[in-house]
Image (cartoon, helix red, strand yellow):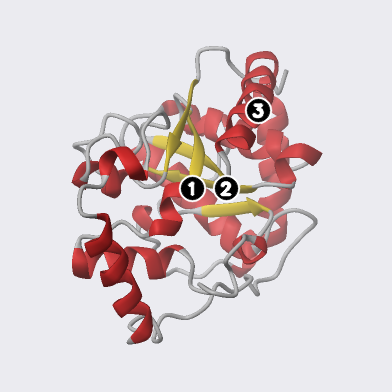
Amino acid sequence: MITDSYIFQQFQILESDFLDILDSEPMNPKDAQMGLGKSAKTWANYEKYPAQCKRHKLLFRKYNVIPRNCWDCYKVEINPNSVLELFKLVFLFRTDAIMRSNTMKFFLHPDKNIPINYAALFYFQSLTEAETTSKHIQEMIKTKINPNISIKVKRGCTDFNNFLPGYADVNLNWDSLVEDKEKWINIELMFDQRNEAKKIKPIMHDSYPANKYFNYKNFKVMLTWLQFAKSIGDQSYLKVTQTSLDFL
């Protein structure tokens, strides 16, 4: 079991590494995202789509077309109940070999119309892999953190499911949901032929000062999580740090 005191001690180490070089520029809670594990640069089709999700979302925003590549994107979504549990997820998965061989993202849901405050995502390019790994994740969380944390397997981005209800359902697919397949295929082909995503920068690795597992940007993201928790009355942030958050 990951104890509260362990999280407090580990965050103290990060504070000693990065607090003195922290800048005063606030971070938008929507941007407070931390990626760990395998880089998206290792994904299939990276050479074809070096901007990855940014390219796909540009196509969607401009033409209301869900990219064909995104139908093979599966996620295990975890929704911790507090910021303390979010930190426990990060520290649990940072050293697990199976988890570090996958792409992970930890972030906030600051929008008030969403009842979920915290989330973690694991990305997969096959449903079988997502379902198999979700069982491993569930067992880890059950024994190490809290058996009552929500875990589910879904397809792709929420925006796509809002546009096309059923998209997130892994039991449905391109063939059953897309009515005008030829139109969508042609629009995406035209989008690429025009190179409309050329101005989007490829995925890059962070180049911030780092300790063994985390870098400066990770630390600033964590501080933003804590400030957000304080703002919504989640008192569990006090079990992560006693440092004043007023300077953020």
Secondary structure under the numbered disc 1 in the rendered image: loop
Q: Quadrant of residue 64?
A: bottom left
- Distance between mark 1 and mark 3 Cα atoms: 15 Å
Mark 1–mark 2 CB contact (< 8 Å): yes
For the question of whether residue 174 can be seen, the reply is yes
Q: Return the residue at label 2.
A: 125
Q: Quadrant of residue 16?
A: bottom right
- Residue 73's label in the rendered image is 1
Is 200 above or below relative to 145? below
The image shows residue 73 at horizontal and vertical percentages of: 49, 48
- Distance between mark 2 and mark 3 Cα atoms: 12 Å
The answer to which of marks 1 and 3 sits earlier in the sequence is 1
Amino acid residing under circle 2: Gln
* Residue drawn at (49%, 48%) of the image: 72
The answer to which of marks 2 and 3 sits earlier in the sequence is 2
Q: Return the residue at label 3.
A: 132
Mark 1–mark 3 CB contact (< 8 Å): no
**Viewer-side residue, 68 vs 12:** 68
230 relative position to 74: left or right: left
* Residue drawn at (22%, 37%) of the image: 165
* Residue drawn at (40%, 44%) of the image: 108
